Image (cartoon, rainbow, N blue to C red):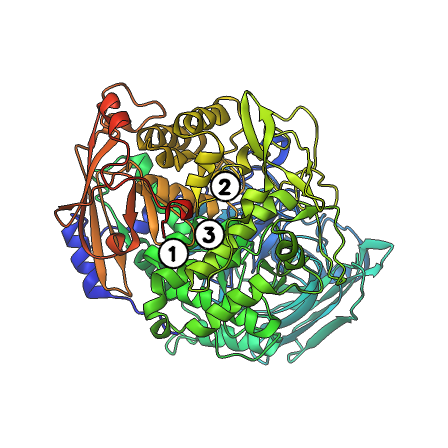
Amino acid sequence: MKLPIHLPLLLFLLSSTNVSANTNLTSLVNLFIGTASGANGGSGGNAFPGSAIPHAMAKVGIDVSTAPRQAGYIHDNSSITGISLLHDEGTGGNTDGGYGNFPLFPFVGNCLNSSGVLPNSPECEPGIQARAALRAQGTDVASPGYFSTTFLSGIQIESTSTRRAGLIRFTFPESNATDSNSNYIVVDLTNDLGRSFSGGAISLSVSSQALGHVELGGTFLQSYGPSNYTVFACYDFDSPVLESGTYQSVNTSSPSVFNITLSNTTNIDLSHSLQFPFTSSISPIQAGGLLAFNTSQVLARFGVSMISSDQACTNAEEEVPTNSESEMWDWDVVRAASNSQWEEVLSRVLVDVEKENDTVVELLYSSLYRASLVPANFTGENPYWDSPFPFFDAMFCSWDVFRTVHPLLSLTSPYEWSQIVSAYVDGWRHTGYIPECRANTKPGYVQGGSDGMPILGEFAVKYGAGAEGLGVSVDDLYQALMDTAENTPPNWLTVGRQNTAWKTFNYIPTDWVDPSGSVGLPTREASRAYEYALGDFAVRQAGLALNNMNFVNMWDPNVTSDGFSGFAQRKYQNGTFAFTDPITCSPVDPIVHSCARGDDNDSGFYESSSWEMSFFAPHSVATLVRLMGGNTTFVDRVNNYFSQGYFTAGNEPSFNVPSIYHYAARPDLSALRIRNIVFSDFSTQIGGIPGNDDSAAMASLLTFHLLGLYPVQSTSQFLINSPFLSSYTLTNAFFNTSTTFTVSGFDNATLVASPPAGSRVFVKSVKVNGVDTGSVCVIGFEDVTGGGEVVIEVDGDADAAAMRGCGPNGLPDSLETGGF
């Protein structure tokens, strides 16, 4: 499906929001936010700052030599081992990282005179450790669609890219190439970020015009899953090749000692190849190609594919064609096209950059950027089944992104979101279940529930009426939800749910063996039950009624903590509870527990504590308020959660808590809490993300905070909070609408962690196209995307704000009170 760019609408919006048509929105994006190392207690945002277009398959970036390096890049003085073609964005998982395949590495040396067995010669160092080079301080430069860095040696690397292809430019100092030395580029076959090579091949040829051509294919391990995957690449070089050949480890016991075979290209039409058969264990072998040049600048064109090296070459030829006049590739055209695509995406949320706070603007556009990096559009690159439907990768994982990423895409990117939803549905067509975590094209581990379900349920309530026009079959979407909710796969380690237990007991029992023989990872039983309940609600939202209140069966009213009674707990099949201290797995847990996905997790909760997970029922928070003792006790309990240090800003189970005061008629407290979180836990620095960006989950959360909204998952409702902007305009291309949000009485003094008394931070009224909605707590999707103007009036009277609650139309919806 070709995505339309509505240029007339865009130009109208640029003028109507007092933003010049010449505004360069990409200049407002800081790609280095969240690139600090996660080592030694660092923030570890794992953000990817390399070159990419929106939702690209190709994400081109440099790779550091030391872990953690989930996205390849770290903003420190780490050595660089190459620039590679595929990367994840903001993920956790394997600290060595995922992808990072087929890196190129430039150096100056003399390999021709050293042909043969060569143990780490300083004149020719193709090995991953020996070749590592330091960057010159302050030379990393990045903007949407472009990246550059410079080594201490003076060699510069630049990249720009398309969806499955791109260009990498190497500039060597003029004095480097001499009679004895040449400018070399290593083409590395075996070293991905995870050092997980399990077999592959490289072929290198030099044409009659002395131009180099390289094709590669290799099998590597997933970064978050039990499987391996195979990927292919194709490189072409624009400069005449002086020498060409291969290198490979002499044996597996001495992988850093190489046999180098090089030929002088005075004899044209040369070819070289290496092949390594697949092995079920990781091979330590290092191998690849070597090319030497005497030009000071070398341009490499690449293509990537999951199908074949021929397909990778075709992708390169189609997406980076040869310029008919220069008979070579046009760097400026590719870079400009990438920048243009990012300008269009960023323009879907427009603000007056001259009027608004600089830090808020930088945070907003940087977050919007990261929120459109993934999932990655691998359409045409599905190696597993033939299908006319889209195929997306980097759905890593639905558990991370269902809360904020997909609700944000629902507002700004309906065409892209529909393609992603279609890919979820197509996964069901060919596996029987909605995908949960697709990493490196293969099913990754299920983290909690089957959290693709809330995504599909939300699409149904927001775009169900127009789904067919967006390429999504409503009938298939419903059936995918039903099958995933009803059926239990033979192994629910990577797909599906433990539905046999869920349907038998109406909760997930501890220490229970499925008599059907179905297996999976049986830990996290308490938190999974809460997520299963939301998944059932998603099915109900899509039009099929299921029992979706089973989370209450995990509620033990007799457990107390800090003077509060009633908490989520594990439960045995006989109906008795298994005690877990509610502070277990919280940031202040005095005992070391395994709280991640694994068979050593004995708490029953995944990446959260009972204190935190007990607040998770977005479809019926009123039930939680009742279970916890009513509005006053509920507010006290939320305050205690924050004051005692149980809150973790950088993890998804905490996302809904700052706004949860709304359900006790205290949106004023939500407004203050969110101000504190944004200015305490986020910034424009390299450590500006409180934990992994998690495939832009954090970026999308921050975007919603800045806009003064928070999505209620699998519904069409948004909670209203106090915006950090005086005005902004949202565009929706499917509805062909623009909706301007204006904050009447906006007060810049509130843009701090603790707004001063009397500053205007509390929402007093909300009008949609001049009509008072009667609620200062909730706004519907139809109003957010309906066009016209939403006016949010704010004031500074804290007592009045506490008294007015949510307004005459009452609290946000909950199933218990007849909502939705």
162 lies left or right of 124: left
Q: Earlier in the sequence, mark 2 or mark 3?
A: 3
Which quadrant holds residue 53? bottom left
Q: Distance between the residues labelled 1 and 2?
A: 22 Å
Labels 1, 2: front one: 2
Which quadrant holds residue 235? bottom right
Q: Residue 204 carries which label?
A: none
Residue on which the image places disc 1:
409
Nearest to the observer: residue 810 or residue 40: 810
Residue on which the image places disc 3:
147
* Residue, far top: 757
- Percent across and percent down for residue 169 are 50, 59
State whether residue 487 appears in this view: yes
Labels 2, 3: front one: 2
| Residue occupying the point 42% across, 71% down | 474
- Percent across and percent down for residue 239 are 53, 68
| Residue occupying the point 72% across, 73% down | 273
Q: The residue tagged with tag 2: helix, strand or loop?
A: loop
* Residue, far front: 574
Q: Which class describes the residues within 10 Å of circle 1: few (<14), some (14-19), or many (20+)? A: many
Q: Which of marks 1 and 2 is nearer the N terminus?
A: 1
Q: Which class describes the residues within 10 Å of circle 3: few (<14), some (14-19), or many (20+)? A: many
- Percent across and percent down for residue 511 are 75, 46
Circle 1: residue type: Leu
| Residue occupying the point 63% across, 33% down | 585
Residue on which the image places disc 2:
616
Q: The residue tagged with tag 3: helix, strand or loop?
A: strand
| 779 in relation to 454, above or below | above
Q: How far apart are marks 1 and 3 (CA)?
A: 26 Å
